[in-house]
Image (tube, rainbow, N blue to C red):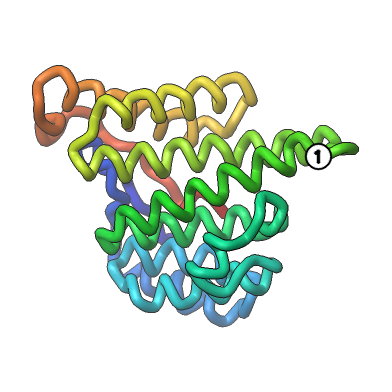
Amino acid sequence: MATYTIDPTSLRERPDDVGASWARVEELEELGERGDGERVAWLRILGALRAAEDLAWDDVVRHGGPGGMVALLSSGPGGVPIAALRPLLRLAQVLHHAGRHVDAERVLEQVRTATVTHLHAPGADERLVRECSAVLAFADQGQGKVLFDAGRPSEAVSLFRAALDRRLRDGAPEDQVESSRLALAAATHALEVGGPAPAGAGFGVRRTAPAGR
């Protein structure tokens, strides 16, 4: 079984078994479009960032979203359908891991704007409200990680705390709550001592499937 652990120092996902992780990628490829969301995440974790980005954009388009950065940034508040929000979150994670922090933040801001628009649309039902809240938590967590890597722990702390508070309020899955706690602890430590948490400070969060699907 392919699993990974979130490193408590870097907040990056690390595959527990690289061979098993690539085997999972092959399994997902055989599923076709149904497996693309998770496949993007595993490709990112394994460092195949070009393949992950190409597949992420394809997945965004399949879910009705814009087909490139220019189109995304020029779309209005209602220009991104709800179905494309999680694919865009996965794209932002890929851009972050590729060191393209500005692009990652731009994508996350578009996700946040579109999500708030859907959240306040007339007739939004409970299911839509819960999905929008989950997406906003992922957006806060994702942007917090970008800022953490960029050496801006104060801003990261605020975003990680917002993600944690929202996930606790919403009754989110425990692994998501724990990842927010881990991220908040790492950013708080960096803010207090001016550097990352020492190696081995915690045990990380182990998962069997990447979040944000």
Nearest the viewer among 170 and 110 is 110
Count neighbours of disc 1 (C-alpha within 10 A) and say few if under 14, some if 14 to 19, many if 20 or more.
Answer: few
Where residue 135 sits: x, y (%)? 59, 42
Q: Give the image quarter of residue 153.
A: top left
Nearest the viewer among 50 and 203 is 50
**Is residue 46 left or right of 195 when viewed as pictured?**
right
User: What residue did someone put label 1 on?
Assistant: 121
In the rendered image of this protein, does residue 198 appear above or below residue 49?
above
Where residue 186 sits: x, y (%)? 24, 29
Q: Residue at x 59, y 31 (%)?
A: 172
Residue kind at label 1, given as amino acid type: Ala
Where residue 109 sits: x, y (%)? 50, 46
Nearest the viewer among 126 and 25 is 126
In the rendered image of this protein, does residue 84 appear above or below residue 28?
above
Q: Is residue 209 visible?
A: no
Q: Residue at x 59, y 67 (%)?
A: 60
Q: Give the image quarter of residue 85.
A: bottom right
Q: Quadrant of the N terminus?
A: bottom left
Q: Quadrant of the C terminus?
A: bottom right
Where residue 121 sits: x, y (%)? 81, 39
